[in-house]
Amino acid sequence: MIQAIRETNFEAFVNVYDTRISNRNITYVRHLFKFINDLDGAVFYAYPASYNYLDRYFQANFIYSSPTVNGDVYLGKLDLIPAGYFKYEVYEVTWVGDEVVLSAITAPSTETTVLPVRDENGVVEGLVAIGKLYLAEKSGSEEVQYTEYEAPASTNTIYYGQ
């Protein structure tokens, strides 16, 4: 499970080495994250802003992008809303060329995007990790809101309240 706080940068530690699809050198592999909000089904995509490869897993860093600035799939900028639980899926994307460039022309923006066949274009190999992300609120109470109702006039109902 990934835990993060809304309106801040966050990092995710994900094990993808056991489920790797391609045998390409890791320098030619990137991971496309798909975040799906459990509450409203909103979908957000992002490649991490930076990677730190470790023995059995990697650290993916994401940058908070304010609502006034559109997030950027290729720069790892996100504004996940609302606070609460998200599902995440990680897709392996590989390049054949000598260099990996993340842009709208050379990198798939979703798991179903198919780019023209060229060495400098990335190819989605497949799903390599799934899990949950809990996004806590930075401040406020938008995550859980309660409304108090008055007791009903009739006596043949069950009433929970003050």
Image (cartoon, rainbow, N blue to C red):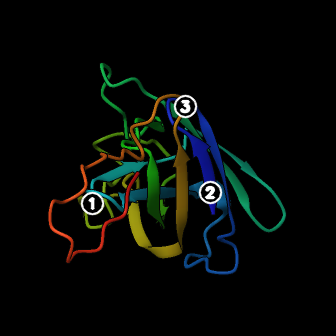
Please tell me the numbered disc located at residue 2.
Answer: 2
- Contact flag, marks 3 and 1 (Cβ < 8 Å): no
Q: Position of residue 116 (x, y in %)?
A: 23, 59
- Contact flag, marks 2 and 3 (Cβ < 8 Å): no
Left-right relation of 132 to 72: right
Q: Earlier in the sequence, mark 2 or mark 3?
A: 2
Which residue occupies 49% across, 63% down?
94
Mark 1 — residue? 41
Q: Earlier in the sequence, mark 1 or mark 2?
A: 2
Amino acid on which the number 2 mark rests in the picture: Ile
Kindly give the residue lying farthest to the left in the view shown. Answer: 154
Q: Residue 54, located in which quarter of the rendered image?
A: bottom right
Kindly give the residue lying farthest to the right in the view shown. Answer: 55
Left-right relation of 27 to 31: right
Numbered disc in front, either 2 or 3: 3
For mark 3, give the secondary structure. loop
Q: CA distance from mark 2 to mark 3?
A: 16 Å
In the image, 149 versus 155, the foreground residue is 155
Mark 3 — residue? 138
Which residue occupies 62% across, 80% down?
19
